[in-house]
């Protein structure tokens, strides 16, 4: 659902994209059947965004002002956008076809990004998870794609620390994972409210921001921070969580939710939960959205689940694996130590990988 | 179809079990075992025992003050509090084990408190003479911001502390004594769980697939260096960065930890000394190849300098920020800690074959 086919990609990219590629890059682009996108850090500590084949051959890359996080590349949207990692305040809309049209935009000075966003169904608006840090309130910033990503408004996220955000298949409902953790840029990576944190999953109307449903976690699991999400074929939202309690605890880390129903914790065998090491870094539905992959860079594992009942299909061991995406070619996995689908690259890939089918 | 998926699941789980069983039979490498043993026996256990002893003394001096209010007894309590704050500063960045259970970390010290929640709660409890704060049983169930070192700092040195030497068994003094007892209970709980022979200490020493602390050598090594990096980063950002801003006009002396008792720099020096001891006792330098041994020398040299600088600034934070030269030293300290973090996070981690350089591990 979130992919561009090759024709659309070339149309969107224009011939400028191909001419902007190096000869080597053009060759790789022609050879490959899909492109992946991820933020990275290079061996010199510089940050950037890259498009590359599923074999790790880079066909395009651009520097970023700081560490990037997730990439939004929804079908129908004229740009892809990479967001700064928390507590960064920049985002870059990139259209590799016309590099001078790259748009660097920022959150307002009293907000910062959380690293994720989603486009509206018509691709004209970009919704971004943000922090109103002086008031410790989660916000959804609204940016107009046509107006150079000007910020035109905001919604409440109805919780603290909104992280991931998805637009459901109905095109009108946003689902938001409020991780529950209060942070402030004065204390960049410090979590300020762990004893009282209250994560939640929220459904809201994408048109007016009104709350449709809010699901909180039970008190004994209030330190299970809801972070990343994807949507399965049947509309269930699958949520990967990160636990903020003791290292030796073994809480449930994957939750699923259907509108109108209660949150359901996915009961994994204890051995599998251990492999997730209390930290799901990414979660992704397969191309046909019938399966769900959850990765844990701390546990060096990728766990594949059936998207209907949550049965474990397989567990793959891979050092520092975190980025995961799926295309018609299958799964792609990246790791912070530079591995991409089993091949070693010179870049440290950030948490998230995005597939752009061509 | 469901049967097939179920059978696949069983096969996969079986595969994990086989792999886990195989891993279980692989002994932890001697180097890592030595590192973990040394960290436990030379750093963790003594540091928590030290905290336990300091809180015991704090508790007994506070009891005496409540019984016999006198300037001399108040000074004894303040001295004991100084020792507790210092003892805590040496171990506070170790974020594993019982300190992470039952909110013990925040119950010992809730900081930063951006909205002054703790101050408001403590002031309200004093104004209303709330009986719930003078007994450890009830205090330990109240807001974490009311239970620990931050609250004790205000009671000892904040507005209205004169009552501590004016009135026997004052509500304020009894609240202080309950905090001291609470801190002693918490540190005893932590210390006892880390004792040799306890399940936690056993688990610390034996990484394996079923061990929830470390499943293998690499996880253990990454944890060890991660603690050092995140600790130094927090000293730079949270402890110094809380009061030292981009310009003198924007400094925030009253955001500094323990500004009332003038222990800000004493505990920052303690933080650095604790990190140096942690580094030496964890024997992280053993992970460096011979050609990179200079990184160890550099680290030790720079830490020694930083501890000396921090030690030379042991005075009230508002005084330091008002003097240009002293403020410059603070800026140097912050910058230098940042350089150390960059070095550890980059060349050191890389030479040691660790992944700390691009960590996912802090919640994103």
Image (spheres, coloured by chain):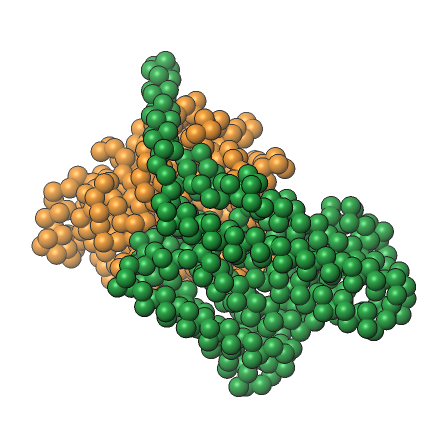
Chain colours: A orange, B green
User: Residue B43, image x and y in percent?
Assistant: 52, 56
Q: Is residue A124 above or below residue B53?
A: above
Name the one closer to the observer, B146 or B197. B197
Quarter of the picture holding the N terminus of chain A? top left
Above or below for A193 versus A199: below
Q: Is residue B14 above or below residue A148?
A: above
Task: State which quarter of the image contains the C terminus of chain A.
Answer: top left
Residue B64's x, y, as percent? 83, 62
Q: Residue furthest right?
A: B167
Count of marks overlaid on the render: 0
Residue at 71% in and 49% down: B185
Question: Is residue B77 rendered to the left or right of residue A290?
Answer: right
* Image quadrant in which you'd find residue B339: bottom left
Q: Nearer the viewer, residue B2 or A168?
A: B2
Residue at 68%, 60% in the rendered image: B54
In this rendered view, identify the residue nearer to me: B18 or B102: B18
Asked if B258 appears above or below A350 in the picture, the reply is below
Is residue B194 shown left or right of residue A120?
right
Q: Residue at x 75, y 53 (%)?
A: B181
Question: Residue at left 61%, top 52%?
Answer: B105
Q: Is residue A237 visible?
A: no
Query: What x and y, as percent, mark residue A156?
Result: 55, 49
Answer whether residue B171 is visible to the viewer in this image: yes
Query: Where residue A313 sits in the image (x, y, percent)?
Result: 35, 25
């Amino acid at each position: 659902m979130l992919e561009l086919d090759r024709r659309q990609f070339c149309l969107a990219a224009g011939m400028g994209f191909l001419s902007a590629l190096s000869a080597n890059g053009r060759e790789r682009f022609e050879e490959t059947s899909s492109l992946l996108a991820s933020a990275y850090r290079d061996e010199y500590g510089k940050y950037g965004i890259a498009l590359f084949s599923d074999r790790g051959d880079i066909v395009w890359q651009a520097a970023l002002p700081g560490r990037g996080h997730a990439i939004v590349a929804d079908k129908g949207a004229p740009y892809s956008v990479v967001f700064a990692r928390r507590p960064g305040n920049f985002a870059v809309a990139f259209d590799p076809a016309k590099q001078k049209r790259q748009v660097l935009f920022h959150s307002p000075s009293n907000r910062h990004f959380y690293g994720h966003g989603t486009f509206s169904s018509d691709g004209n608006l970009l919704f971004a998870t943000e922090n109103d840090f002086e008031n410790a309130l989660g916000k959804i910033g609204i940016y107009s794609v046509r107006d150079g990503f000007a910020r035109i408004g905001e919604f409440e996220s109805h919780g603290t620390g909104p992280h991931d955000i998805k637009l459901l298949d109905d095109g009108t409902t946003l689902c938001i994972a409020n991780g529950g953790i209060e942070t402030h840029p004065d204390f960049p990576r410090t979590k300020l409210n762990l004893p009282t944190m209250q994560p939640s999953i929220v459904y809201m109307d994408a048109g007016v921001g009104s709350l449709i449903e809010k699901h909180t976690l039970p008190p004994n699991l209030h330190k299970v921070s809801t972070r990343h999400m994807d949507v399965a074929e049947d509309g269930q939202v699958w949520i990967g969580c990160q636990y903020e309690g003791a290292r030796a605890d073994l809480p449930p880390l994957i939750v699923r939710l259907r509108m109108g129903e209660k949150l359901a914790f996915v009961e994994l065998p204890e051995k599998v939960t251990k492999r997730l090491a209390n930290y799901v870094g990414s979660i992704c539905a397969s191309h046909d959205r019938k399966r769900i992959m959850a990765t844990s860079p701390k546990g060096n594992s990728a766990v594949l689940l059936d998207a209907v009942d949550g049965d474990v299909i397989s567990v793959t061991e891979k050092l520092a694996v975190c980025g995961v995406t799926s295309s018609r070619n299958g799964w792609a996995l990246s790791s912070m130590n530079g591995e991409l689908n089993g091949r070693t690259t010179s870049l440290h890939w950030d948490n998230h990988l995005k597939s752009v089918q061509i | 179809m469901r049967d097939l998926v179920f059978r696949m699941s069983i096969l996969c789980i079986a595969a994990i079990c086989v792999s886990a069983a195989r891993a279980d039979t692989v002994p932890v490498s001697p180097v890592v075992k030595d590192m973990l043993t040394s960290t436990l026996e030379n750093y963790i256990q003594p540091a928590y025992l030290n905290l336990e002893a300091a809180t015991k003394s704090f508790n007994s001096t506070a009891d005496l003050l409540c019984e016999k209010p006198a300037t001399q007894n108040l000074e004894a309590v303040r001295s004991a509090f100084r020792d507790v704050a210092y003892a805590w500063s040496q171990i506070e960045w170790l974020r594993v084990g019982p300190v992470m259970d039952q909110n013990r970390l925040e119950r010992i010290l809730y900081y930063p408190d951006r909205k002054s929640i703790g101050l408001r709660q403590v002031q309200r409890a004093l104004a209303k003479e709330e009986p719930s704060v003078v007994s450890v049983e009830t205090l330990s169930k109240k807001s974490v911001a009311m239970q620990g070192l931050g609250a004790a700092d205000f009671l000892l040195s904040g507005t209205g502390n004169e009552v501590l030497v004016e009135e026997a068994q004052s509500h304020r003094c009894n609240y202080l004594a309950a905090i001291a007892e609470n801190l002693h209970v918490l540190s005893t709980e932590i210390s006892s769980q880390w004792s040799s022979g306890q399940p936690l200490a056993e688990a610390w020493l034996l990484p394996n697939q079923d061990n929830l602390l470390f499943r293998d050598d690499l996880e253990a090594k990454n944890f060890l260096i991660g603690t050092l990096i995140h600790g130094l980063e927090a000293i730079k950002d949270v402890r110094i960065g809380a009061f030292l801003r981009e310009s003198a006009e924007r400094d925030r002396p009253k955001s500094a930890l323990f500004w009332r008792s003038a222990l800000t720099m004493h505990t920052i020096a303690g933080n650095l000394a604790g990190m140096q001891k942690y580094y030496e006792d964890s024997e992280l330098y053993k992970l460096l190849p011979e050609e990179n041994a200079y990184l160890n020398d550099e680290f030790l040299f720079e830490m020694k300098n930083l501890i000396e600088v921090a030690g030379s600034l042991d005075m009230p934070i508002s005084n330091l920020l008002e003097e240009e030269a002293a403020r410059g030293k603070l800026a140097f300290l912050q910058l230098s800690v940042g350089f150390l973090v960059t070095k550890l996070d980059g060349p050191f981690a890389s030479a040691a074959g660790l992944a700390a350089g691009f960590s996912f591990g802090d919640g994103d």
